Image (spheres, rainbow, N blue to C red):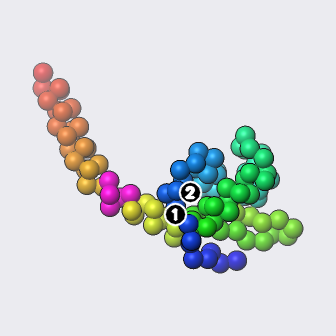
Amino acid sequence: MAPTQPTGDPFEALGDPHRRAIVELLSSGGRSVRELADELPISRPAVSRHLRLLKEAGLVFDRPEGTRRLYSLHDQGVEEVRRYLENVWGEAAARFKIAAENTNRRHRRR
């Protein structure tokens, strides 16, 4: 099934540590609810609720495989989050890197 238009906020969805853990697990490939629940300290129904929120936020999608559904990261949704973070923090991170490199050089000269 093709990913649908997101209706939720990806940053709100990522605000929960269990949902972040699910995203991390899905980064290595598609998994079923059972496979995710086996890796997490929460029940299958809880995993399903978290997946629903991640799906609404456009970060995951599901597809049928036999009698189960496999969940995978939605590349476009994840890319949009990455782009946003780069836009917001990219310049600050670049300035921090320059400051850190300059500080490191001064310490080496002593």
Residue 66 coordinates in the image, percent (x, y)? 85, 70
95 sits left or right of 79 in the view: left
- Secondary structure of the residue carrying tag 1 is loop
Q: Please name the amino acid that badge 1 sits on.
A: Asp
Q: Residue at x 47, y 65 (%)?
A: 79
Q: Residue at x 14, y 29 (%)?
A: 106
Q: How many marks?
A: 2
Q: Are marks 2 and 1 in contact (CB under 8 Å)?
A: yes
Q: CA distance from mark 2 to mark 1?
A: 6 Å
Q: Please name the amino acid that badge 2 sits on.
A: Ala
61 sits left or right of 66 in the view: left
* In magenta stretch: residue 24: no
- Secondary structure of the residue carrying tag 2 is helix
Residue 108 coordinates in the image, percent (x, y)? 17, 26
Q: Point out the image quarter for the N terminus.
A: bottom right
The majority secondary structure of the magenta stretch comes to: helix
Residue pointed to by mark 1? 9
Mark 1 crowd level (few <14, some 14–19, many ≥20, 10 Å Cα): some
Residue 13: image tag? 2
Residue 19 coordinates in the image, percent (x, y)? 61, 51
Q: Residue at x 49, y 57 (%)?
A: 11
Residue 73: image tag? none
Q: Point out the image quarter for the C terminus.
A: top left
Instruction: Report the span colored magenta.
Output: 85-89
